[in-house]
Amino acid sequence: MSEKCFSDFVREHLNVGHEMLYLTREDVKSLNIPKEVLYEQMEKALSMYSAGSTQMPAKSHVFPDTHSVYIGMPALIPEMESAGVKWVGAYNHNMRDYGLPALCAHLLVSDYKTGWPIACMDGVHIMETRTPAIAMVAARYLARKDAEVFGMIGLGREGRNHFPVVKDGMPNLKKVLVWDVSEAAMDKAIADFQDIVPVPMEKAESLEYIVRNSDVLASATFFSTDPKPTIKDEWVPKGQTIIVTDLHSQFHPDTINRAALYVVDSKDQQEHLVEAGYFYGTIPEPHCELGDITSGNHPARTNDDDIIVANPSGMAVDDFAVSPIVIKMALEKGVGRILPL
Ligand SMILES: NC(=O)c1ccc[n+]([C@@H]2O[C@H](COP(=O)([O-])OP(=O)(O)OC[C@H]3O[C@@H](n4cnc5c(N)ncnc54)[C@H](O)[C@@H]3O)[C@@H](O)[C@H]2O)c1
């Protein structure tokens, strides 16, 4: 099926305008989207976004307090006949107060031809797989070719999902270091993933150690409008590639300012995040978007000594580049429930 025919495909399986597909997280997970397909969709989404061939207004944030946020994320990708809105809740104290993960997300997907809803699905599984896939796309383009040590700071849902794919971004991977403020999270990450990761996984002895000893350093901790960086600039070695999913909340602005290349996924979104107060101190204007690099319109790494920081804050186009694949696979396999509108 060409992506252009997605609307017609949906019509063959769904009475559009009268019914929609509902997919739980387990439904989405059970489809096992091949990771090669994810990489392909992510590269397309990043490149199309930076080429201006998608529509994606910057995320809208509404804040119940400084530790919590709701985020509305609409997107339209004409090439994929994909349109919809993602609705996220991010409550940093959920686990402490309610025993629930901080993040929840749902995608409401609309029919490209009529605007009617065709699916409502869990967005967390897509998010927790597409985000590490983007990190690996970034690593492929930005890391030194001889990068051997991957460091992961923050071992929650996002951080842990980097492990099954880390070798895809670092072909010369020799070691994985992990760090989390929770000792139990470090033990669990190693127990759960050592069988899958083809190189030794080790607990770093300190935050300083993982920063000083990683060629590619990823962080997936948390962000807030009251960030308090924990990583000292002098710990960051030359040649390091830093790839964050948490708006580099743990990094001092001096590191971001001395990076030879500071890359975001969306300059527009970055501007809104700056305005919303997510960054500590003054940070530079991004040099380019990740999609400029994946499409070859901006050079990637040009010097092995450069520090490069990639800050893909997550875009709705990432999710809505995956949703047509999910819907197609679910309708073909009879996964999920068809609900009346
Ligand atoms: N950029 C994107 O596309 C994208 C997508 C999804 C989530 N996120 C963000 O990624 C981050 C992680 O999300 P998650 O769902 O994995 O959260 P989570 O709550 O499941 O995990 C966070 C982990 O970080 C650890 N942690 C907290 N502070 C730390 C610190 N100072 N040093 C080391 N470890 C620390 C926690 O103990 C926990 O294990 C959040 O900021 C989330 O908003 C970004």
Image (cartoon, rainbow, N blue to C red):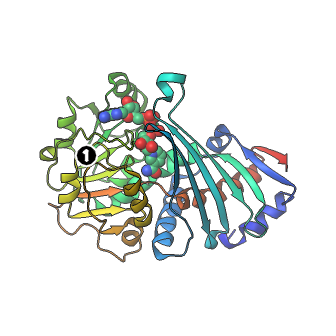
Q: Nearer the viewer, residue 61 or 143?
A: 61
The local crowd at label 1, few if under 14, some if 14 to 19, many if 20 or more residues have their Cα within 10 Å, is many
Distance from mark 1 CB to nearest ligand 1 atom below 8 Å: no
Residue closest to the eye, 72 or 259: 72
Asked where in the image residue 125 lies, by quadrant, the reply is top right
Q: Nearer the viewer, residue 200 or 302?
A: 302
Q: Is residue 90 visible?
A: yes
Residue 324: quadrant of the picture: bottom right
Name above or below for residue 303 compared with residue 176.
below
Q: Quadrant of the N terminus?
A: bottom right
Residue 339, horizontal then vertical, whole percent = 83, 46
On the image, the x and y values in percent for residue 15 come to: 87, 58
Say which element carries label 1.
Answer: loop
Horizontal and vertical percent position of residue 247: 36, 49
Residue located 31% across and 65% down the image: 286
In the picture of the structure, the residue carrying the numbered disc 1 is 251
The residue positioned 87% from the left and 56% from the top of the image is 18
Q: Is residue 234 left or right of residue 154?
A: left
| Residue 307 visible here | no
From the viewer's perspective, tell me whether residue 121 is left or right of residue 251.
right
Instruction: Give the amino acid type for the residue marked by disc 1 in the picture.
Output: Phe
Q: Residue at x 20, y 52 (%)?
A: 255
Task: Judge from the rendering whether residue 256 lies leftward or rightward of residue 139; answer left or right.
Answer: left
**Numbered disc total:** 1
Q: Quadrant of ligand 1?
A: top left
Percent position of residue 158, x then y: 44, 41
Which residue is at the far left?
A: 234
Which of the two residues, 305 or 201, is positioned nearer the viewer here? 305
The residue lying at 22 percent from left, 47 percent from top is 252
